[in-house]
Amino acid sequence: MFLVGLTGGIASGKSSVSSMLRELGCPIIDADVVARKVVEPHTRAYSRIVYHFGPEIVLENGEIDRQKLGQIIFASEEKRRLLNSITHPEIHKEMLKEILLYFLRGYRYVVLDVPLLFETRRLTKFLNHTVVVYCDPATQLQRLMQRDGLTQEQAEQRVAAQMPLNEKRGLANHVIENSGSREDTHRQVLRLHTKLEDSMDFLLVRVIAIATTAGLSGILLYAARILLS
């Protein structure tokens, strides 16, 4: 099994592309879903977030007010880094558990849907392919304002808090251009899906895994023979 990283920018359409891949039968591990899971009440990350950001970010039902927390971190790079330092290790551990489950079920590859894939760079060394969902800056800003009901200033602030899409585009192996129609995006996703399905990367990974296992078994067998001789 090999790993594919999917990323983009805020309001670039990454979630739409992820949904299209899921409809085609691709296993998806969504970092946003995992992120919500690891900050549920009584978790380690939850306790640390409340400690550092204060009880005012907690809703009446005990859950973290994501909107209020978002306002804090988008206004302060220091606070954003603090939150990332708390949540990212927990997110990566949970994602690893899900990857292992897919591996045991025999999938050829798994798509990791990670918004901050290139910002953190903790996962890129494990990926065989990286995919960026791109749209032009004007389209991105307009979509964000309409989706979240933000003013232009608020939207620009949130876009500026992330790595520019053009920079991410230069780091990726594959680019999905999402400035146009949904139909055009879907055609690009189908082409990407075909490339991934035809890829032989999973064979290399399995050969390495088998060789490693065989090598370890040989070492253990050799050690046992010495001990019994």
Image: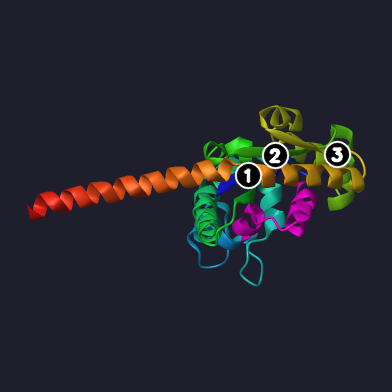
SS at mark 3 in the image: helix
Please count the marks in the image: 3
Mark positioned earlier in the residue sequence (1 or 3):
1
Q: Residue at x 22, y 52 (%)?
A: 221
Mark positioned earlier in the residue sequence (3 or 2):
2
- Residue 83 image offset from top left, x and y in percent: 57, 47
| Mark 2 burial class by Cα count in 10 Å: few <14, some 14-19, many 20+ | many
Distance between the Cα atoms at labels 3 and 2? 21 Å
The furthest residue to the left: 229
Q: Main secondary structure of the magenta part?
A: helix
Tell me the magenta residue range: 13-36
Mark positioned earlier in the residue sequence (1 or 2):
1
Residue 115 appears in view: no
Above or below, 130 relative to 65: above
Q: Residue at x 56, y 67 (%)?
A: 41
Whether residue 40 appears in magenta in the rendering, the answer is no
- The circle on residue 131 is 2
Q: Which residue is mark 1?
A: 4
